[in-house]
Image (cartoon, rainbow, N blue to C red):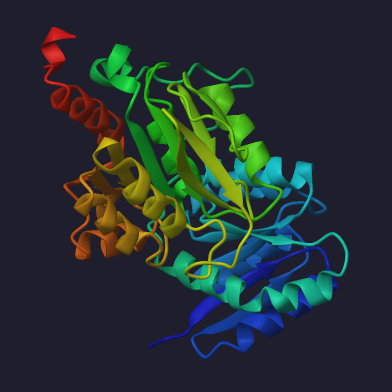
Amino acid sequence: MNPIRVVVVDDSALVRSLLTEIINRQPDMRCVGAAADPLAAREMIRSLAPDVITLDVEMPKMDGLDFLARLMRLRPMPVVMVSTLTARGAETTLRALELGAVDFVAKPKIGVADGLRQLGADISEKIRAAARAQIRKAPLPLPAVAAPAPAAPAAAARPMGRLSTEKIVFLGASTGGTEATREVLTRLPADFPAVMITQHMPPGFTTSYARRLDSLCRIRVAEAEDGQRVLPGHAYIAPGGLHLSVERSGANYIARVQDGEPVNRHKPSVEVLFHSAARVVGPNALGVMLTGMGADGARAMRAMREAGSWNVCQDEASCVVFGMPREAIAAGAAHAVLPLGQIAEALTEQLRSTAGLSLNRV
């Protein structure tokens, strides 16, 4: 099997050297070039035809986002962004994921050398996932004033009324999941049941991510806070570096946000959230597994099904990485396997059908 060919693009000679060292230590990958700016990178990509590139966000001569946007229009290929752990870095990284980057690595502002070496296994894993990812050509750039979001299908946009009070949707995602989750949430009506979300993300990025989703969705979206009541019309995102779960307090559901050991090497972990759904919410839960690498949440999603929940997994054709959904399907957890664009409507239809109401009557 041929090694994964990687080009590293970063204006820091230290970072280029460290990433090259990390990549070349792996038996299944090789750094075939390292560029200090996008103009040099462009020539390397033409001559070396890499399988994956790592791309710094902030660079001279051409901004990393501008380069990424052009690359994804003209020569779409797997890109792993290298971001700084700052608020500005988080915003820029989210924009890069919108433009088509597969994933990102967050480098510390200080102690870069030690920080990157500690992230060596994570970086290598993300490069492997990127090499297998399904890459799509980026759309034409949006005008300066963003156009309104496309209207949701009528069935999904219709108000839910009393159907939303007892049900909770639990959603897990990883690689490719930031955009997949946005696709689902923007199609939901304002009074949809509560949605609790675990997206694999490091600390410092989920605040910006929640704020961005909140600006796009009919439902309210925020980072989850420990002890807060879980309410219809709201989505709660697990803060990076902390586990999210649900508990019962009298007649109410509440969010639990807690530190702890990584589960399946992840914190937050989908397994933690989904196991709490099976234990606490049972038949009033709906589970959603979106694109992602690995198997986090698969066993717990099966436990949700056994407790009476209804579960849907994203299909392979629409996934960036068909890892987590594939494992959940293999575990017998899924009632339905659907393209990403049909999941919001399927959730709505399931809620109405289980309430004894047809779509046509509401």
Q: Quadrant of the N terminus?
A: bottom left
Residue 167 position (above or below residue 304): above
Q: Examine the rendering and report whether any part of residue 158 can be seen.
A: no
Residue 182 rendering spot, x and y as whole percentages:
46, 35
Residue 342 rendering spot, x and y as whole percentages:
25, 34
Residue 143 rendering spot, x and y as whole percentages:
58, 22
Comparing 148 with 69, the one in front is 148
Q: Which residue is found at the position 79% from the left and 48% from the top? A: 86
Q: Quadrant of the C terminus?
A: top left
In the figure, is residue 54 to the left or right of 358?
Answer: right
Residue 160 rendering spot, x and y as whole percentages:
30, 15
Asked which quadrant contains residue 189, the reply is: top left
Q: Which residue is found at the position 77% from the left and 79% from the top? A: 17
Q: Which residue is found at the position 50% from the left and 35% from the top? A: 254
In the figure, is residue 149 to the left or right of 327?
Answer: right
Q: Which residue is found at the position 77% from the left and 42% from the top? A: 87
